[in-house]
């Protein structure tokens, strides 16, 4: 059954596995098991944590792509406007 991630749980995962988010890598089971030593995460399995990290990374990469495309579009519009003057 799916269970929403509490803010405290998300913060605990990011505090313990933050470098994996930054490097866009999935942590191994050993790193996740160390993360699970935090009592806040007592109701989560190592697979839950790995899936959470994967989902957040995927969401962030999709957002980054959308943001990059929006910035490129804005830049092209400015170039066109500036060439008119």
Image (cartoon, rainbow, N blue to C red):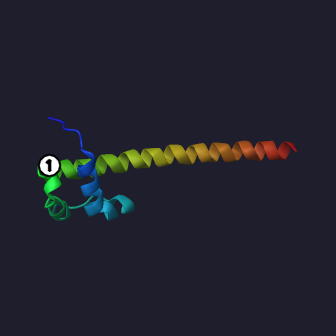
The quarter in which the C terminus is drawn is: top right
Q: Is residue 59 left or right of residue 69?
A: left
What residue is shown at x 68% (from left), y 47% (from top)?
Answer: 75
What residue is shown at x 48% (from left), y 49% (from top)?
Answer: 64
Q: Judge by depth and name the residue closer to the eye, 79 or 41.
A: 41
Q: Residues within 10 Å of mark 1 (few under 14, many from 20)?
A: few
Q: Position of residue 83 (x, y in %)?
A: 83, 46
Q: Is residue 43 left or right of residue 26?
A: left
The quarter in which the N terminus is drawn is: top left
Q: Position of residue 4 (x, y in %)?
A: 23, 39
- In the displayed orientation, state which residue is furthest to the right: 85
Q: Judge by depth and name the residue closer to the eye, 46 or 35.
A: 35
Q: Quadrant of residue 16?
A: bottom left
What residue is shown at x 57% (from left), y 44% (from top)?
Answer: 69
Q: Is residue 47 left or right of residue 80?
A: left
The answer to whether residue 42 is above or below residue 28 is: above
Residue 24 showing in the rendered view:
no
Residue under pointer 1:
44
- How many marks are shown on the rendered structure? 1
Residue 62 showing in the rendered view:
yes
Q: Judge by depth and name the residue closer to the eye, 76 or 39.
A: 39
Q: Position of residue 57 (x, y in %)?
A: 35, 51
Secondary element under disc 1, as helix, strand or loop, is loop
What residue is shown at x 13% (from left), y 50% (from top)?
Answer: 45
């Amino acid at each position: 059954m799916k269970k929403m991630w509490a803010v405290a749980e998300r913060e605990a995962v990011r505090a313990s596995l933050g470098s994996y988010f930054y490097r866009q890598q999935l942590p191994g089971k050993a790193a996740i098991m160390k993360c699970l030593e935090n009592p806040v995460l007592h109701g989560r399995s190592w697979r839950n944590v790995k899936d959470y990290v994967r989902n957040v990374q995927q969401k962030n990469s999709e957002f980054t792509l959308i943001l990059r495309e929006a910035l490129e579009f804005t830049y092209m519009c400015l170039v066109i406007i500036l060439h008119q003057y």
